[in-house]
Image: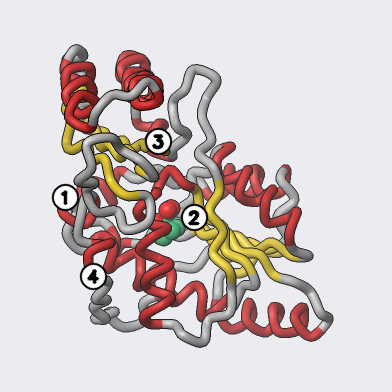
Amino acid sequence: MEIFYEIKPLKKRLETLRKQGKKIGFVATMGALHDGHASLVEASNRDNDITVVSVFVNPTQFNNPDDLAKYPRDLQSDVKVLEENEADILFAPSVPEMYPTEDTRQFELGSVAEVMEGKYRPGHFNGVCQVVSKLFSIIEPDNAYFGQKDYQQIAVIREMVRRYMPDFKGKIVSCPIKREADGLALSSRNLLLSPEQRTSALLISRTLFKAKEMSDGGATQSELTNFIKKSIATDANLCLEYVEIADRDTLQPITADRPVNAVICITVYDGKVRLIDNILL
Ligand code: PAF
């Protein structure tokens, strides 16, 4: 695997590969790589000749400095995961390389970015758009792969591209959530959980699976929401930040009694660790 820390040589290398007719896939990450990321690399390898992975803990998307300080970082182990999964190029820039001057761009993305994570993490999606737009401009991928665990993030990135990068030709590919055998959605933040908190975290996916079953059996939106709130409240380690039953495409709260074409999005604090998950109905 080739490793680049700087933009210029990476762009030069990609230009050469493009001239050779190579199709380029891209996986953006903040490191602490796990099987969820590996599944994105696998999808990219399947569809493209070259897979580029970025590892960059983007400071502008953290609205909580403590969260940024604690975010797990281990480039050596990331390199190992990427080599095992046959990524071709790793781009691991420093903060000054990505932001030589302050990025003051403000992205207006409308309602898709205002609900849920947009409401509870002000500035988060603006930071995501700052870094993803830079990465897209540097790498110019044919396909870019994102995991559905960050369901809203994919919708926001699609809207950012639509509004601000009309010349971007790449396709944004959404990939299914990867879960542990016991249901826990894979996340770099799982590394921050104590064994007891990890056990508590299982209730999040179990609750979502049960809610889907209830929805398939005809439960109404308010029945589902009440069930989820009660279920999460049974574990003293867990504190529900929000649960929304939203339209899959617009991400606006659904108004119909019975959810169709919907997604349940949930955010729960497990101790101090903020976990998100979702399930399609
Ligand atoms: O999903 C993530 O890990 C990050 O938000 C992303 C897309 C790599 C941007 O920093």
In the rendered view, does 21 fall on the left or right side of 136? right
Alpha carbon of mark 3 to alpha carbon of mark 2: how far?
27 Å
Residue 281: numbered disc: 3
Alpha carbon of mark 3 to alpha carbon of mark 1: how far?
23 Å
Above or below — where is 66 with respect to 223?
A: below
Looking at marks 3 and 4 on the same chain, the residue that comes earlier in the sequence is marked by 4
> Is residue 192 visible to the viewer in this orientation of the structure?
yes
Taking depth in this image into account, of 275 and 193 the one nearest to the observer is: 275
Above or below — where is 106 with respect to 147?
A: below
Q: Position of residue 259 (x, y in %)?
A: 30, 38
Marks 2,4: beta carbons within 8 A: no
The residue positioned 78% from the left and 65% from the top of the image is 49
The residue positioned 32% from the left and 49% from the top of the image is 247
- Label 3 sits on what residue type? Leu
Mark 4 Cβ inside 8 Å of ligand 1: no
Dot 1 falls on a residue whose secondary structure is helix
- Label 2 sits on what residue type? Thr
- Circle nearer the viewer, 2 or 4: 4
Tell me if mark 1 has few (under 14), some (14-19) or many (20+) residues whose alpha carbon lies within 10 angstroms of its own. Answer: some
The residue positioned 31% from the left and 83% from the top of the image is 101
Residue 120: numbered disc: 1
- Circle nearer the viewer, 3 or 1: 3
Dot 3 falls on a residue whose secondary structure is loop
In the rendered view, does 141 fall on the left or right side of 64? right
- Label 1 sits on what residue type? Tyr
Alpha carbon of mark 1 to alpha carbon of mark 2: how far?
22 Å
